[in-house]
């Protein structure tokens, strides 16, 4: 297959190359917040950019030189500065706009081996060819530094499509919760209250969240008229209205209150898991979800809430994880589909 090559422009000044190194190595090592070391004119101790990796902090020294201008002595000088400054890094990467030089590469590798044997941090040199290779191998970097490259355009279109699909599925998932609102219990004494709560359910199913919130507020003026299950329904309805109108954080307490008031209802149990998720208590949500699944093994609502918690924890979810009795349920399959799309997006970000 013919590979389409494309030109990547070199930065116009030292500051632009520093920024470029921060962007590229931050992306490569998964650091969303790489740090430029001080401002121009300050002593930087051999490091222009700090990047955090899974192994520890890396130091990047950027050298915007013409071909052949970077020498081993210059690399050694930057190492001396870093050692003197006692810069807290596990490796120094000297990045340069100069073309690849086999002799210098070998010399730096030998120097690095000697340093490691002596208990010092290693050093690497990255030539312009290496930097361009990083850009060509990463769709996000292509969009920044070679936006007209085929890979950049493909990545942007594919990522846009996946983002749209994920948004649609998240909206469907949110509305699925609305359609799964608990109805009245036959043993509730105050049938008028039950009918009012049922009417609010219909408002929420029609996505009339502002109207629903007004109705819930009016009905809750005297909570003493509601039995425990009705109170739990009331809190769950208000949680859903608040979630849609103000955001998840504002709805946390109401979700948790609904589950606390009537844990015998599977949908209230699912609401409790969701409340923990919205409160960013992932471990608590997984634990509560597992407990609820054990208690309500046939509940789709509980299973979806538990599975969402597992997804947030970073667990891989497969179709085989869906209980056999739920595999024909569109809500459960939608949940799995959303996870697959998110996984594709993560893969694409690493492409």
Image (cartoon, grey):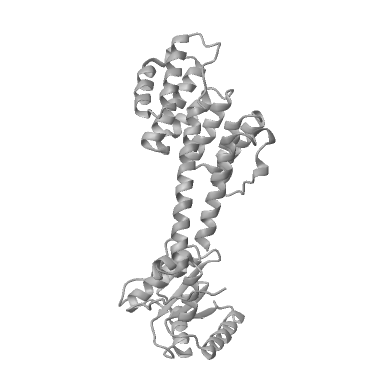
Can you see residue 288? Answer: no
Image quadrant of residue 225?
top left
In the displayed structure image, the side of residue 335 where residue 248 appears, left or right: left
Q: Position of residue 210 (x, y in %)?
A: 34, 28
Query: Residue at 50% of width from left, 78% of height from top?
Result: 130
Query: Residue at 62% of width from left, 49% of height from top?
Result: 316
Seen in the picture, residue 297 relative to 70 is either above or below; the reply is above
Which of 200 and 293 lies nearest the eye of the viewer?
200
Residue at the extreme left: 41
Question: In which quadrant will I find the N terminus?
Answer: bottom right
Seen in the picture, residue 154 relative to 103 is either above or below; the reply is above
Which of 228 and 315 lies nearest the eye of the viewer?
315
Query: Residue at 62% of width from left, 46% of height from top?
Result: 317
Q: How many marks?
A: 0
Q: Position of residue 242 (x, y in %)?
A: 39, 32
Which of 341 and 154 lies nearest the eye of the viewer?
154
Q: Position of residue 302 (x, y in %)?
A: 59, 32
Query: Residue at 48% of width from left, 89% of height from top?
Result: 72
């Amino acid at each position: 297959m013919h590979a389409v090559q494309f030109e990547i422009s070199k930065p116009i000044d030292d500051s632009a190359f520093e920024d470029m190194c921060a962007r590229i190595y931050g992306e490569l090592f998964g650091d969303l917040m790489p740090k430029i070391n001080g401002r121009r004119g300050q002593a930087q101790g051999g490091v222009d950019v700090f990047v955090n990796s899974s192994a520890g902090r890396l130091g990047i020294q950027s050298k915007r030189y013409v071909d052949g201008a970077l020498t081993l002595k210059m690399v050694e000088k930057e190492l001396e500065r870093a050692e003197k400054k006692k810069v807290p890094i596990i490796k120094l990467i000297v990045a340069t706009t100069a073309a690849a030089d086999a002799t210098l590469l070998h010399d730096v590798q030998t120097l690095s081996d000697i340093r490691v044997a002596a208990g010092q941090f290693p050093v690497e040199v990255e030539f312009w060819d290496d930097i361009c290779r990083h850009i060509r191998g990463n769709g996000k970097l292509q969009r920044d530094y070679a936006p007209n490259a085929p890979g950049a355009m493909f990545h942007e279109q594919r990522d846009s499509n996946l983002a749209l699909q994920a948004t649609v599925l998240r909206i469907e998932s949110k509305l699925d919760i609305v359609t799964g609102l608990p109805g009245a219990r036959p043993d509730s004494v105050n049938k008028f209250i039950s009918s009012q709560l049922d009417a609010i359910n219909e408002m929420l199913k029609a996505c009339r969240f502002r109207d629903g919130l007004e109705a819930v507020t009016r009905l809750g003026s005297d909570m003493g008229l509601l039995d425990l299950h009705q109170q739990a329904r009331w809190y769950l309805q208000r949680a859903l209205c608040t979630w849609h109108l103000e955001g998840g954080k504002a709805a946390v307490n109401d979700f948790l209150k609904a589950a606390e008031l009537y844990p015998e209802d599977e949908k209230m149990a699912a609401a409790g898991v969701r409340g923990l998720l919205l409160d960013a208590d992932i471990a608590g949500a997984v634990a509560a979800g597992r407990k609820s699944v054990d208690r309500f093994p046939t509940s789709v609502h509980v299973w979806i809430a538990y599975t969402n918690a597992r997804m947030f924890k970073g667990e891989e979810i497969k179709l085989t994880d869906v209980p056999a009795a739920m595999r024909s349920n569109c809500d459960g399959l939608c949940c799995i589909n959303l996870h697959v799309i998110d996984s594709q997006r993560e893969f694409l970000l690493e492409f």
